[in-house]
Image: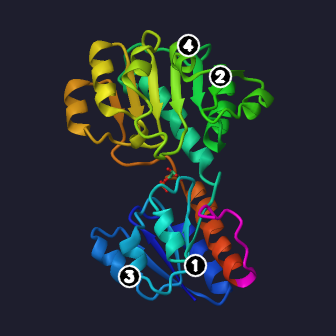
Amino acid sequence: MKILVATEKPFAPVAVKGIKEIIEAAGFECALLEKYTQKSQLLEAVKDVNALIIRSDKIDAAVMDAAPELKIVVRAGAGYDNVNLEAATAHGIVVMNTPGQNANAVAELVIGLLLYTIRNRFDGTSGTELKGKKIGLMAFGAVAQNVARIAKGFGMEISGFSPRNQPQKIIDAGFHVHEDVQSLFAENDIVSLHIPATPQTKGCITYDLIKSMKPNAILLNTARKEIIDEEGLLRAMTERPDLRYVTDLKLGAHDEAVEKLAGRYIFTPKKMGAQTSEANINAGLAAASQIVDFFKNGVTTFQVNK
Ligand code: 3PG
């Protein structure tokens, strides 16, 4: 069996070492394609592989066509919107993710970005504090639960909204549940987005929601850029010069946002929520183990294209 780790944005070396050890201990071969810049490199690298470990790497029908031996793709991470599930099913390929494994890293970035923003990018001027501020979480999966845990330590007031109307986890954690997305946006000082990118969520963060935010509110997006109605965001933030949009996912309209929202569109140079050694080890090793378990024992836990 040949397993390819194909990561345009590489794992930390210590994670790659661990992945190799798990694969080789199972008697399989491990190949590596990191920092590739052309799709043709990926197409060439997959031609004889049986399994793939990826991150946000785009796995479409063309990649599957180029990989006749491919049986399983494991997205080392949570969101699998980068994999064409229909094409995978049609090709008889199992797709899995590794839910929760990088959640703490993303949550710590959320809080880090927040501190950076409210302390005026550490420029030495007088900022504000998190204590006593209201943070509203859109969805309450693994990342949001970790954000809540850390925010509690800062003395923040936490609430959540469950877009799929499954608020039990928010209730069990003892936080206020918003009945609708409108109140989530209208009642919090900070709204942090934790929903996946799906056809249903595409562009769901609209002009109206953003425009309704509290004075000086912050909208935090470490989820996916596709969930934002970008035209609506730009319009709402132009009309509301007190709002800030903070993200590790550059907008499609990045240059326009930099120009129009000077200093209020705060972004990192690269998607980096899951960029820690710990998250890379957790997600990478889980991916390797899931592949070994799949080939040796037929285990399909975490399959997402059932
Ligand atoms: C995820 O879906 O797990 C996160 O968005 C992390 O993505 P990454 O592996 O590309 O950093």
Helix, strand or loop at label 1? It is: helix
Q: Which residue is mark 2?
A: 159
Q: Earlier in the sequence, mark 2 or mark 3?
A: 3
**Residue at 67% across, 37% down:** 145
| Residue 150 position in % (x across, y down) | 65, 32
Task: Indicate the amino acid at tag 2.
Answer: Ser
Q: Earlier in the sequence, mark 4 or mark 2?
A: 2
Q: Earlier in the sequence, mark 4 or mark 3?
A: 3
Disc 3: CA contacts within 10 A as few (<14), some (14-19) or many (>=20): some
Mark 3 close to ligand 1, CB under 8 Å: no
The colouring scheme, among rainbow, by chain, secondary structure or one colour, is rainbow
Q: Which residue is mark 4?
A: 187
Region in magenta:
296-306
- In the picture, the quarter occupied by the C terminus is bottom right
Task: Indicate the amino acid at tag 3.
Answer: Ala
Task: Indicate the amino acid at tag 1.
Answer: Lys
Helix, strand or loop at label 3? It is: loop
